[in-house]
Image (cartoon, rainbow, N blue to C red):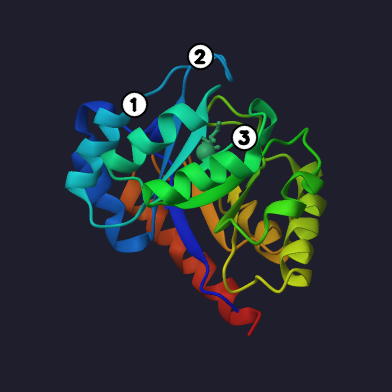
Amino acid sequence: MKPLQIAPSILTADFGSLADEIRSVEAYVDWFHLDVMDGHYVDNLTFGPSTVAAIDKVTDLPLHVHLMISDPAKFAPVFVDAGADRISFHPEVVDDTHAVIEIIKKAGAGAGIAVHPDIEIDVVKEHLDDVQVVLMMTVRPGFGGQKFLNDVVPKISQAAQLVQESGKSADIDIEVDGGINLETVDGAVAAGGQIFVAGSAIFDGVDAPGAARRLRERLDRVGKGSE
Ligand code: DX5
Ligand code: ZN
């Protein structure tokens, strides 16, 4: 079984102390998940490549940029130059998913398909030879702090099964994004999740390192349980 990993989303972090927030949880996590929103694909606007570049200077952990934007082909290379190690995008906004995957990989990052809660998992089927991550959204894109959508759990299992049947289990991570906390993470693991995005459950303005440590301890326990 692959190690279970944590990717905190910085969306609800204190942007006035972003470097401190990032450093405070580094010991317990494996990636940072950077939610880029353009106010078109979603009704929210977050940050751009300069923020990603600033974060890349603060941490040596890999950065997964989640593009919730209407033109991922245009901006993916800019985010790779800023330091993104992986880039996921939403296929429903592009004409040629394969072409965008190729643009991301040619720029030097790993490519991922982000699956909106309303989008069928079949959207990933023909791309399993080319992607490194399938990002299963368990909230509606746009905002941190939303409730985990339990209805998506069967779709996570379908994604895990598709990846397994493709023979690409070693090459593709199943990442679960949205509403992950100590109450929801066990179900996400059982469904086949391997990397867990947690935003408001970690950057809650109370005790980010403690929350990250508790989630790490939970995943270590759950991971042992399934060996
Ligand atoms: C939502 C983002 C998620 C979300 C995670 O559009 O893609 O990454 O912010 O934050 P929480 O864990 O608070 O749902
Ligand atoms: Zn995200």
Q: CA distance from mark 1 to mark 2?
A: 12 Å
Q: Residue furthest bottom?
A: 227
In the displayed structure, 125 sits above or below 89; it is below
Residue 173, image x and y in percent? 58, 62
Which mark is on residue 39?
A: 2
Q: Is residue 224 left or right of residue 126?
A: left
Q: CA distance from mark 3 to mark 1?
A: 17 Å
- For disc 3, the marked residue is 90
Query: Is residue 155 shown to the viewer in this render?
Result: yes
The crowd level at tag 3 (other Cα within 10 Å; few <14, some 14-19, many 20+) is many
Which mark is on residue 48?
A: 1
Q: Determine whether the residue tagged by mark 2 lies in a helix, strand or loop.
A: loop
In the displayed structure, 53 sits above or below 227; it is above
Residue 97, image x and y in percent? 64, 39
Which mark is on residue 188?
A: none
The crowd level at tag 1 (other Cα within 10 Å; few <14, some 14-19, many 20+) is some
Q: What amino acid is labelled 1 in the image? A: Gly
Residue 44, image x and y in percent? 50, 16
Q: Label 2 near label 1: C-beta < 8 Å?
A: no
Q: Determine whether the residue tagged by mark 1 lies in a helix, strand or loop.
A: loop
The crowd level at tag 2 (other Cα within 10 Å; few <14, some 14-19, many 20+) is some
